[in-house]
């Protein structure tokens, strides 16, 4: 597409993007957008026709059509952590619960929890990478922030990818983006307004880890606030080196773990071993063949061990939070419903130094 067909504001953004990309070629899309004061979706809209194709805003249908691509790489991230997992998008299901729309992919490799009410824009992107051309399908929320990205691997079916792009390409590639900012998160109520005793009693009667969020809603309590009020038999703080230590001990003791990373629209899960750990600047990284994790330790503000009752016994987790009190990453021992958690995982958690 000739740049002259772009609206003037997108022409200016494209020019500023190209200047910044040339000056700092290692900057990732999220950081480029932040530096330019726009969303990632804005950056892609400015590049439509030059490796970028706008797709119809039909994320559920697009996700159902990913399986024929074969093995791909799923990427979900937040401000502080990136989760990458290779596999096939099989066993999809979508359903509504009240006003909420949910989706699931439940597989040994691609394991996702999707909150579809937040999903908005989608693009197909082709851009130069270290090993040639990177091809991806990228999804964004209603504010233009990235929720989930799917990259082709050397085992993917490129013809199926091109067919998907043709099928879902938007008729109007230059339609203005309609972005809606999210409201700022409300501050927690004062502790004195929380019925802490009722909260603690409710906690002891939990039957499933999925019952935790509804409990927070019932008592109108913030997540970290609930951990503080629960008592040390239910939640206690550990040193912020705990994430690194969990990964190191899981590797050294050959304990399979679960790693959850999410944002408002998607939670991505790895279940299995971790082996190759590497440091890069402020990031601790897992660099295994099918699973990569990139965690910025400088962004960690608080780390908590939580113990939640279930019908299968206590489930123990390491929950890691950023300076905005948002959840960055959660670690569990490998487990399935009906099976108690691994004693080897409980041993790892017991060895984490308390804060």
Image (spheres, grey):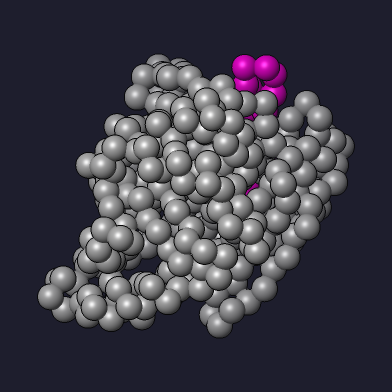
Q: Nearer the viewer, residue 16 or 335?
A: 335
The x, y position of residue 198, in whole percent, is 28, 81
- Judged left or right of residue 235, residue 135 is right
Q: Relative to 132, does residue 175 appear above or below in the rendering? A: below
| Residue drawn at point x = 34 percent, y = 38 percent | 352
> Quick check: is 124 in the magenta stretch?
yes
Residue 327 seen by the camera? yes
Q: Nearer the viewer, residue 184 or 120?
A: 184
Residue 40 seen by the camera? no
Residue stretch in magenta = 120-134
| Residue drawn at point x = 35 percent, y = 24 percent | 282
The x, y position of residue 118, in whole percent, is 52, 63
Q: How many marks?
A: 0
| Residue drawn at point x = 69 percent, y = 56 percent | 105
The x, y position of residue 143, in whole percent, is 44, 56
Q: Main secondary structure of the magenta part?
A: strand
Q: Name the image quarter holding residue 13.
A: top left
């Amino acid at each position: 597409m000739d740049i002259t067909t772009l609206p003037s504001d997108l022409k200016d953004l494209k020019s500023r993007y190209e200047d910044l990309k040339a000056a700092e070629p290692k900057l990732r899309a999220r950081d480029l957008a932040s530096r330019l004061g726009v969303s990632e979706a804005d950056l892609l809209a400015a590049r439509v026709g030059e490796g970028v194709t706008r797709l119809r805003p039909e994320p559920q249908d697009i996700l159902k059509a990913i399986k024929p691509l074969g093995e791909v790489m799923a990427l979900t991230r937040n401000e502080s952590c990136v989760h990458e997992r290779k596999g096939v998008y099989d066993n999809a299901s979508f359903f509504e619960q009240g006003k909420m729309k949910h989706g699931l992919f439940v597989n040994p490799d691609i394991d996702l929890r999707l909150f579809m009410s937040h999903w908005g824009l989608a693009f197909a992107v082709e851009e130069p990478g270290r090993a040639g051309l990177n091809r991806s399908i990228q999804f964004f929320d209603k504010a233009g922030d990235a929720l989930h990205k799917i990259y082709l691997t050397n085992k993917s079916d490129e013809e199926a990818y091109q067919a998907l792009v043709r099928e879902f390409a938007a008729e109007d590639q230059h339609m203005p983006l309609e972005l809606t900012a999210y409201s700022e998160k409300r501050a927690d109520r004062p502790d004195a307004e929380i019925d802490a005793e009722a909260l603690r009693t409710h906690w002891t009667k939990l039957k499933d880890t999925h019952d935790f969020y509804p409990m927070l809603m019932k008592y109108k309590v913030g997540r970290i606030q609930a951990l503080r009020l629960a008592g040390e038999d239910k939640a206690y703080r550990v040193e912020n080196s705990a994430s690194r230590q969990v990964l190191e001990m899981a590797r050294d003791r050959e304990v399979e773990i679960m790693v959850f990373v999410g944002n408002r629209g998607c939670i991505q899960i790895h279940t299995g071993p971790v082996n190759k750990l590497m440091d890069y600047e402020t990031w601790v990284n897992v660099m295994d063949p099918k699973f990569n994790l990139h965690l910025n330790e400088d962004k960690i503000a608080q780390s908590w061990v939580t113990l939640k009752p279930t019908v299968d016994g206590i489930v123990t987790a390491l929950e890691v939070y950023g300076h905005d009190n948002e959840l960055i990453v959660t670690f569990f021992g490998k487990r399935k419903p009906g099976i108690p958690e691994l004693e080897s995982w409980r041993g790892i958690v017991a060895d984490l130094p308390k804060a």
